[in-house]
Amino acid sequence: MITKPKGTYDVIGNDAQKLERINRLIEYFCDFYNYEYIRTPIFEATDLFHRSVGDETDIVSKETYDFKDRSDRELTLRPEGTAGVVRSFIENKMYGTILPKKLWYNGTMYRYERPGNGRNREFTQFGVEILGSNDPAVDAEIISMPYRLFEELGIKDLNVKINNLGSKEDRENYKVALKKYLEPHLSELCEDCQRRFKTNPLRILDCKVDNNSEILKNVPSILDYQSEESTKRFNKVLEYLEYLDVDYEVDSKIVRGLDYYDYTVFEIVSETDALGGASTIAAGGRYNNLVATLGGPDTPCMGFATGLERVMLAMEDVDKRALDCYIMYVNEEEKIKAITLAQDLRISGVSVDYDTTGRSLKSQFKEADRNNAQILVILNSEDLKRGLITVKDNLTKEETKVDENEIIDYIISR
Ligand code: ATP
Ligand code: MG
């Protein structure tokens, strides 16, 4: 028997029902918040991720699936969604259209990680990006939208951790202070951090090995190294979040695992036990320099992404969706009526099913219950001769005979 590759999984049973519910809600939300759908390729030029996510990040230094195609092109399975969206924004000259551009995506991502609870090699991210606005109201929307989505999905103990990384200049000032503080303790940090000290000291705050050490607990706060303008901007974001009733906590250690962030960064966590160590269900931030870094015009942007596997873990089980209508029949004449009526009802927006395994009428009733059918249509030749169809309300058990020509309207009105 051939089994699935390590770190991948099949979505079946209750997980599949959860994922359907999540996907449906995502579509509603994106519609209500006025985002346009975008789909970009699952593989991109390897360079795209090196230049955007950053060489010194875990994602690019150890987690990408890189390969050469048959013509020796260097390609990478996308580890995240923003780089591809920004590439597309530039390549399709969307910066020349009316801004901001509000885009959403939902698709599989690939990272060569050690698989565990809420950590897979193939996983799914839903994310949105707002390109072309630096308004703090954008930051507030990018944070509150997934927050409200998770609430709607019934996820408990939600909290937003938010930080301000400031401008490039603010970060440079902070890096000097951070290095000065860390230098005497360097030998006590992990090997990766010793390298990061030279290449990208901010990354040390994101280290999964050292994050509980006393040294990292007492690092200077990046919030103390912000310009007045940056602090003012951040306070505005917090003010808007308060108006929007979002629970947040300022956490000066949140830097996120990607290089392109500046100003606001955040994580949404849920402390439900089901998530184990992987309590971050969504994360994002502002990236005002990425479009320019990838060759486009200066465009301030912000976005978030959420891992749907973690959302599924944090959710309670969902009930199987109820079927609107189950049609029952015994002989061939009734069967023909069943399949045509089912088609007409389905086209009219009613969910319908009927037996295709030769079940007895008694088993068809059981099958209707198993499908949680609300209305039963019981076809019988005698009735059909008189132009009538028996309809039974499966909750009240009330039965009526309805004129064949009015059956669709009758069922829709129920
Ligand atoms: P972590 O610190 O948990 O590794 P990250 O910083 O790598 O997360 P991002 O790159 O910001 O995460 O991705 C955003 C979201 O995508 C995460 O909050 C998580 O929900 C999800 N995610 C990231 N990596 C994985 C994975 N390997 N499997 C499942 N979900 C993932
Ligand atoms: Mg990671």
Image (tube, rainbow, N blue to C red):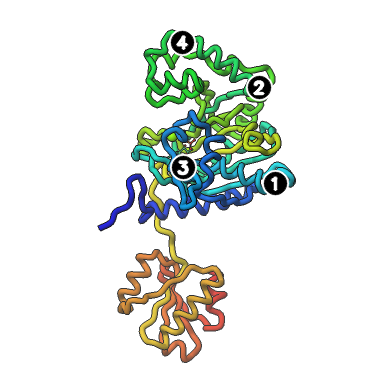
- Mark 4 or mark 3: which comes first in sequence? 4
Q: CA distance from mark 4 to mark 3?
A: 36 Å
Circle 1 residue? 93
Circle 3 SS class: strand
Circle 3: residue type: Gly
Whether tag 4 and tag 1 are in contact, CB under 8 A, the answer is no
Residue 211 lies, with reference to residue 118, above or below; the image says: above
Q: Position of residue 312 (x, y in %)?
A: 42, 46
Circle 1: is it few (<14), some (14-19), or many (20+) Cα within 10 Å?
Answer: few
Circle 1: residue type: Lys
Quarter of the image where one finds residue 356: bottom left
Q: CA distance from mark 4 to mark 2?
A: 27 Å
Q: Nearer the viewer, mark 4 or mark 3?
A: 4
Whether tag 1 and tag 2 are in contact, CB under 8 A, the answer is no
Q: For the point 56% across and 35% down, which residue is it?
A: 52
Q: Nearer the viewer, mark 4 or mark 2?
A: 4
Residue 307 numbered mark, or none: 3
Circle 4 residue? 183
Q: CA distance from mark 3 to mark 1?
A: 29 Å
Circle 2 residue? 230
Q: For the point 33% across and 49% down, which residue is it?
A: 5
Residue 290 lies, with reference to residue 41, above or below; the image says: above
Circle 4 SS class: helix
How many marks the image carries: the answer is: 4
Nearest the viewer among 125 and 270 is 125
